[in-house]
Amino acid sequence: MEAELSFWSLFLQASLLVQAVMVLLVLMSIGSWAIIFQRKKVLKLSQEQSLKFEDRFWSGVDLARLYKELSAKGANLTGMERIFHAGFREFARLRANPNADGPIVVAGAQRAMRVAHSRELDRLETHLTVLATVGSISPYIGLFGTVWGIMNAFISLSGVQQATLAVVAPDIAEALIATALGLFAAIPAVIAFNRYSYKVELLDNNYINFMEEFSGILQRQTLTSGTANANEQVKAGEGVA
């Protein structure tokens, strides 16, 4: 009896539709685990890079020098590095225009940072919807296979004169395996989706806070430069007088 009720034997005895459901659930489980490990690596690296960049940014380094260091990396920028690079590049470009005043320069830098922030958020949330989908539909797919298998089991019992436990057990067991596989695929996907969504939210809050702090620094720089230019103009006017 133990050999007859093994997983493989029950899979082979199941109907073609139930077998297809089982194979689909196994593939969904494998795919979700691949996404789980891949997202874990990406989010951990993003968090480490954000902490490293924040330490570098608040160490008192010259912003122009930091911008040049990041520019040397090319397309390998992520997280706060990408946001800072986009904002400072737009800030420097607009500041070179003598007709652009301080608010316009800061607003342009903020727009560039928001675009970079949106793209970075899309990168962090990649494939998370797949985990949510697997977690939500896998139990229903497994339940569909179970219902179909139990239905076929009762249909086959209609032709048996004496229904004993030995006759019923294999058909019921092969039907319930589909539900078990559905839960096996859904539970890790739901746990990973909730955990990674929370981590993405934390990183997103860090990015938003950095954008606000960096915008304040840029605004102070424009005010300082504007005051310096005004003082120079006043001194020039006194010299002429």
Image (tube, rainbow, N blue to C red):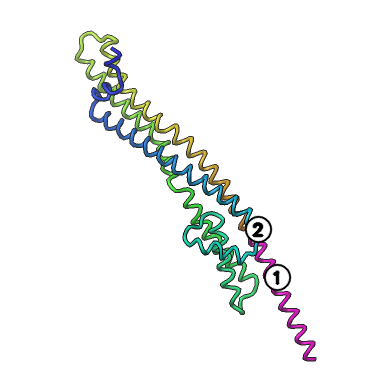
Lateral position of residue 17 relative to residue 106, left or right: left
* Residue assigned mark 2: 213
Lateral position of residue 12 relative to residue 220, left or right: left
**Which mark is first along the chain, 1 or 2?**
2
- In the rendered image, residue 42 lying in the magenta stretch gets the answer no
* Residue assigned mark 1: 223
Vertical arrangement, residue 150 with respect to residue 70, above or below: above
What is the CA distance from the residue labelled 2 to the residue labelled 1? 16 Å
Location of residue 1 by image quarter: top left
Location of residue 183 by image quarter: top left
Describe the element under mark 1 as helix, strand or loop: helix
Residue at 28% from the left image edge and 26% from the top image edge: 148
Query: What amino acid type should be assigned to the residue bearing mark 1?
Result: Leu
Residue at 78% from the left image edge and 89% from the top image edge: 239
Query: What amino acid type should be assigned to the residue bearing mark 2?
Result: Glu
Please report the bounds of the magenta region as a residue range.
212-241
Lateral position of residue 33 relative to residue 156, left or right: right
Describe the element under mark 2 as helix, strand or loop: helix
- Indicate the position of residue 138 as horizontal and vertical percent values: 38, 34
